[in-house]
Amino acid sequence: MPIVDKIMFVQNLALMIKTGFSIGDALTTLSQQIKGKQFSRVILDLQQSVVKGESFAAALQLHSEVFDDLFVNMVAAGETSGNLEQTLFQLSNQLKKSYALHKKIRNAMIYPCLILAVMIVVGTGMFVFVVPRILDLYTTSGYTLPLPTRIILGISDFIQHNGLILGSLISVLLIGWILFVRTEPGKFVWHRILLHIPIAGKIIKRITIARLSRVLNSLLVTDIPIVNSFKIIANTINNRVYRRHLILASQQLAKGNTIHSVLSSRPDLFEPVVTQMIKVGEEAGVL
């Protein structure tokens, strides 16, 4: 489901409720304005559920493929507290920030990926077409080549004579890796590898912490208990390493531990400056 459509839906719904629309009437109107047929049908289903007497949060929960746990729980908290309109505005801001961050990451990755693709093509071309000619030149001249040069020429010769076998082996390994990464253990292994990649690992950590902080702030504003907040955040974080630790953190928080003590146990995931700021906020009561 396009996130832009979801942003427009939440923003317009908040405005309509603010101007006095009932949720049922607002959903009926919005279903006619949304261009995407699939999302329009989802909104009509929400409207029918609300008209039948279900809460808006319960109706959203029936469409978990569109509305995640964060969305549903914030709406539920807003309905309980009587501040649904304000909660929807917060959700709208949350979605906008997530979309802006995703767009920046995507744009930032285009250039490095393009350079990497060009390097692979050029490198393969060098080994297949250029290096063999150099090999023929030095073989006929009778010169003794340095070891690094002989290694490069050997690799090139191997690729030329065993290209089909090598290509098949790489394809099998690649397919096997893709299938493995689609499993939960595979995702955990892959995400842990990503966190240890130079430069990229730091970027992933900072993006994850930024998202965690933003979502936690939104949940605390809606008065959702801190233990439940960490469970919800765990389901919104894609990185399985962070997700596993946040689930463990919610269990430790339920036992009475502080957020600072729980997060500082993993300095590889949470930088000291982050945990220290949390500690100050907890001690001052202005988390």
Image (cartoon, helix red, strand yellow):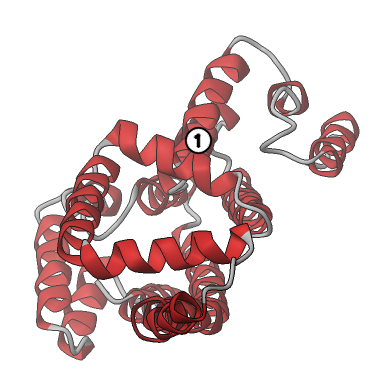
Identity, as a three-letter code, of the amino acid under mark 1: Val
Query: Which residue shows up at 50% across the image and 56% down it?
Result: 83
Residue at mark 1: 241
| Foreground pick, 252 / 284 | 252
Which quarter of the picture shows residue 181?
top left
| Foreground pick, 27 / 240 | 240
- Report the side of 57 relative to 125 (left or right): left
* Quadrant into which the C terminus falls: top right
Say above or below: 35 vs 154.
below
Say above or below: 225 vs 205.
above
SS at badge 1? helix
Say above or below: 283 vs 96.
above
| Foreground pick, 163 / 110 | 163
Query: Which residue shows up at 31% across the image and 61% down it?
Result: 158
Which quarter of the picture shows residue 162?
bottom left
- Note whether residue 19 is visible: no
Q: Position of residue 66 (x, y in %)?
A: 24, 60
| Foreground pick, 137 / 203 | 137
Q: Position of residue 125 (x, y in %)?
A: 38, 83
- Report the side of 200 relative to 119 (left or right): right
Q: Position of residue 2 (x, y in %)?
A: 29, 77
